[in-house]
């Protein structure tokens, strides 16, 4: 199953890479299309401007040609009728012709050949005007000769040459117009092809991306379903194992209770017979003293040594061992009873609880000259007796293992951290070797100098209680640098299920 999940994850990774690649291609295509469209649009605008320019030149040429023809028509009317109104028409036509010629010169600045033609037409216009002035002044035979050959006179020649130049310019502009219109059509075709190609590419990229996303989503849904099934199976397995552990723990507690309870009977017997031996030893010792005093004949040296030294020493060892064994059995019984006690969560004021512990230890605090600081602690929902036992054990240990000759400093602080409450008990005591940080939580195990009373049960019991309360205890310490014990509990504990 794990291999299958890893394979799915691998496929998803490849699909994601392909999706990113396709999206990158799509964006690159859009960028390239935007650049191409910008360039094509600029080229199209340039072509349109050139077409418009060519049309403008053609329009000015047509206007010039019209003014030139009007000028020639008015000249004929003036020569034939002598009506001065035709002179005004000629003046207006000449002014229009020169204005259009100037505009043509401006429009065709970039065309040297057209500039030459425009200059030639200006020269012809000047010559035509000079010839007209001379022809107006003719009289008699000269005037009749001019009128007779009017269709072939010099002025008509100027007009015909001007007309030929206009036709040549129009032909060239028409050729330019066709070339520029062809360029504009090519640009438009390229623009259309680019848009079509970009659109097709985007459609292909979008289709490929959607297909990959669909496959990826399908694989993701399958993975989620598989994960949900795994989680369901894991939860069921955890519940089953938790129930088994709870039953095993209860069985161990019952076994410990039975064993410790049954051990008390022979222990009581041993202690009783030890007391009888002690009484017998005293009787024998009294007898020996009386024999010495009354002169009965004292016991030999070995007997006296056994009565006065060996027997009292053996009885003392037996008594101390039985007393220690009695304390251990009582501790085991207490642990068993505490482990079987039903825990009841309730809202607790940790600050008030710690102040209560401080008040109960007031005499020891005063006697050791210890400074105990308690900061406001957050509230918690948990079992009162268990929390009091844990905190009391931590504070008592901080008082018990102070450095000799150094005023004790103990501070108790707390905070909320991601749905949990952390209570820290820090001291400047002896400290604990890092190698023993876990050992001190083992039952009947202690660390450092054994100059303080205790059986090595307190911290083991405190951590076991913390586990039952849904939390744990951790320590940070080094030799000679003090210790910090942290009690970490859920902010709101809802209790436990006991299978009795």
Image (spheres, rainbow, N blue to C red):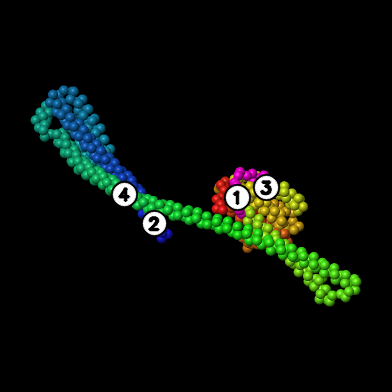
Q: CA distance from mark 2 to mark 3?
A: 54 Å
Question: Taking 391 as reference, is 83 left or right?
Answer: left
Q: Is residue 354 above or below residue 81?
A: below
Please provide the residue range marked out in magenta.
Answer: 339-356
Give the residue at the far front of this rendering: 296
**Residue in the foreground of this view, choosing between 175 and 493:** 493
How many other residues sit within 10 Å of disc 4, few (<14), some (14-19) or many (≥20)?
few
Q: CA distance from mark 3 to mark 1?
A: 23 Å
Q: Is residue 141 visible?
A: no
Q: CA distance from mark 1 to mark 2?
A: 47 Å
Q: Is residue 223 visible?
A: yes
Query: In the rendering, which numbered label is found on residue 207?
Result: 4
**Residue in the foreground of this view, choosing between 110 and 380:** 380
Q: State yes or no: residue 326 in magenta.
A: no
Residue 337 on image: x %, y %: 63, 54
Q: Earlier in the sequence, mark 1 or mark 4?
A: 4
Query: In the rendering, which numbered label is found on residue 354?
Result: 3
Residue 154 on image: x %, y %: 14, 35
Residue at x 74% of width, y 67% of height = 317
Residue 323 on image: x %, y %: 72, 62
Question: Taking 356 as reference, is 464 left or right?
Answer: left
| Residue bearing the label numbered 1 | 342
Q: Nearer the viewer, mark 4 or mark 2?
A: 2
Q: CA distance from mark 4 to mark 2?
A: 22 Å
Q: Earlier in the sequence, mark 1 or mark 2?
A: 2
Give the residue at the far right of this rendering: 294
| Residue bearing the label numbered 2 | 8
């Amino acid at each position: 199953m794990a291999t299958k999940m890893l394979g799915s994850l691998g496929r998803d990774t490849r699909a994601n890479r392909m999706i990113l690649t396709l999206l990158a291609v799509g964006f690159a295509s859009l960028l390239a299309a935007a650049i191409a469209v910008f360039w094509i649009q600029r080229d199209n605008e340039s072509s349109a401007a050139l077409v418009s320019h060519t049309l403008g030149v053609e329009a000015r040429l047509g206007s010039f040609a019209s003014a030139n023809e009007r000028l020639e028509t008015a000249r004929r009317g003036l020569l034939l009728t002598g009506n001065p109104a035709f002179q005004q028409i000629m003046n207006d036509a000449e002014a229009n012709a020169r204005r259009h010629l100037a505009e043509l010169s401006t429009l065709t600045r970039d065309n040297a050949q057209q500039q030459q033609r425009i200059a030639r037409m200006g020269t012809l216009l000047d010559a035509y005007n000079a010839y007209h002035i001379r022809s107006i002044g003719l009289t008699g035979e000269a005037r009749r000769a001019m009128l007779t050959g009017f269709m072939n006179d010099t002025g008509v020649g100027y007009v015909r040459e001007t007309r030929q130049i206009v036709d040549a310019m129009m032909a060239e502009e028409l050729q330019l117009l066709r070339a520029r219109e062809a360029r504009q059509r090519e640009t438009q075709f390229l623009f259309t092809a680019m848009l079509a190609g970009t659109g097709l590419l985007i459609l292909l990229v979008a289709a490929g991306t959607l297909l990959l996303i669909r496959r990826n989503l399908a694989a993701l849904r399958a993975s989620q379903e598989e994960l949900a099934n795994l989680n369901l199976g894991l939860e069921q397995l955890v519940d089953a194992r938790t129930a088994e552990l709870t039953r095993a723990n209860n069985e161990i507690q019952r076994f410990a209770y039975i064993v410790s309870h049954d051990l008390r009977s022979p222990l009581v017997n041993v202690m009783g017979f030890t007391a009888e031996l002690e009484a017998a030893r005293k009787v024998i010792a009294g007898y020996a003293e009386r024999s010495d005093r009354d002169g009965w004949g004292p016991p030999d040296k070995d007997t006296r040594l056994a009565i006065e030294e060996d027997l009292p020493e053996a009885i003392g060892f037996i008594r101390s061992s039985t007393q220690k064994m009695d304390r251990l059995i009582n501790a085991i019984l207490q642990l068993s009873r505490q482990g079987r006690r039903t825990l009841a969560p309730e809202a607790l004021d940790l600050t008030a609880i710690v102040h209560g512990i401080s008040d109960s230890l007031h005499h020891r605090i005063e006697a050791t000259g210890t400074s105990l600081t308690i900061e406001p602690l957050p509230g918690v929902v948990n079992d009162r007796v268990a929390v009091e036992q844990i905190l009391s054990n931590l504070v008592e240990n901080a008082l018990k293992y102070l450095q000799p000759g150094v005023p004790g400093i103990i501070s108790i602080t707390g905070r909320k951290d991601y749905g949990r409450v952390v209570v820290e008990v820090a001291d400047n005591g002896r400290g604990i070797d890092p190698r023993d940080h876990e050992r001190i939580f083992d039952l009947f195990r202690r660390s450092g100098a054994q100059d303080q009373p205790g059986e090595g049960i307190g911290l083991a019991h405190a951590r076991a209680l913390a586990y039952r309360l849904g939390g744990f205890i951790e320590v940070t310490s080094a030799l000679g640098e003090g210790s910090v014990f942290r009690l970490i509990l859920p902010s709101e504990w809802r209790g436990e299920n006991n299978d009795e």
